[in-house]
Image (cartoon, rainbow, N blue to C red):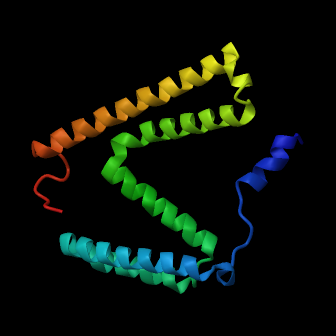
Amino acid sequence: MDDRAKLDPVYFSLPDSHWCDIGPELYRSLARVHMSIGLALTELERLYPDEVSAASAEAAAAAALGTPSPADLAFQMHEVAGAVLAHVAGEEQDLRQIIGTLRTSLAVCWDLYSARESERITVAEHMRHLRGRIEDFERELQAVRRAHESRRDAGSGPAAGNSR
């Protein structure tokens, strides 16, 4: 077994987590999210009253399984957050991922080479190219957003007719 195969299971897993390890500052953050989710659910219940009973049954079934661990809750919140973002900014997700990856690459370049070494043609050119690519994708992201806003303003977007 190669070293990577040994490391992958560690990278893709989390240690056991327990609520006693969660501090009061995280409690406050979770309480704010809880309140926001409650308000959002109230709005969604108003918009989609037929979904309330099915959603309540699913929630009751999940509650019967007991309190999720902090890691399990974090994964659930991550999945829901991803789904919400896909609905409200789906056209932007791929561009945001590319921009984030390129920004990370740029930071790694700075971490791997000192300022003096970065003046060497190969590293400096690479970093300029990377910065240029980030800016290109950011411009594309702005264009996608403007197009989305134009469609919405024209009344053809998913938010048409919804004042919220």
- Quadrant location of the C terminus? bottom left
Q: Residue at x 16, y 45 (%)?
A: 152
Q: Residue at x 13, y 61 (%)?
A: 163
Residue 71 picture location, percent across and down: 63, 69
Q: Is residue 146 visible?
A: yes
| The residue positioned farthest toward the right in the image shown | 1
Q: Residue 24, relative to residue 15: is it above or below?
A: below
| The residue positioned farthest toward the front in the image shown | 116
Q: Residue 123, relative to residue 41: is it above or below?
A: above
On the picture, is 16 further left or further right than 82?
A: right
Query: How many numbered markers are drawn?
Result: 0
Asked where in the image residue 136 lies, by quadrant, the reply is top left
Residue 109 picture location, percent across and down: 67, 31
Q: Residue 97, relative to residue 12: is it above or below?
A: above
Residue 34 picture location, percent across and down: 42, 78
Foreground residue, 127 or 2?
Answer: 127
- Quadrant location of the N terminus? top right
Q: Residue at x 17, y 39 (%)?
A: 150
Residue 3 picture location, percent across and down: 87, 42
Q: Residue 83, relative to residue 62: is it above or below?
A: above
Q: Is residue 50 visible?
A: no
Q: Residue at x 29, y 32 (%)?
A: 143
On the picture, is 94 further left or further right than 161?
A: right
Foreground residue, 124 or 152?
Answer: 124
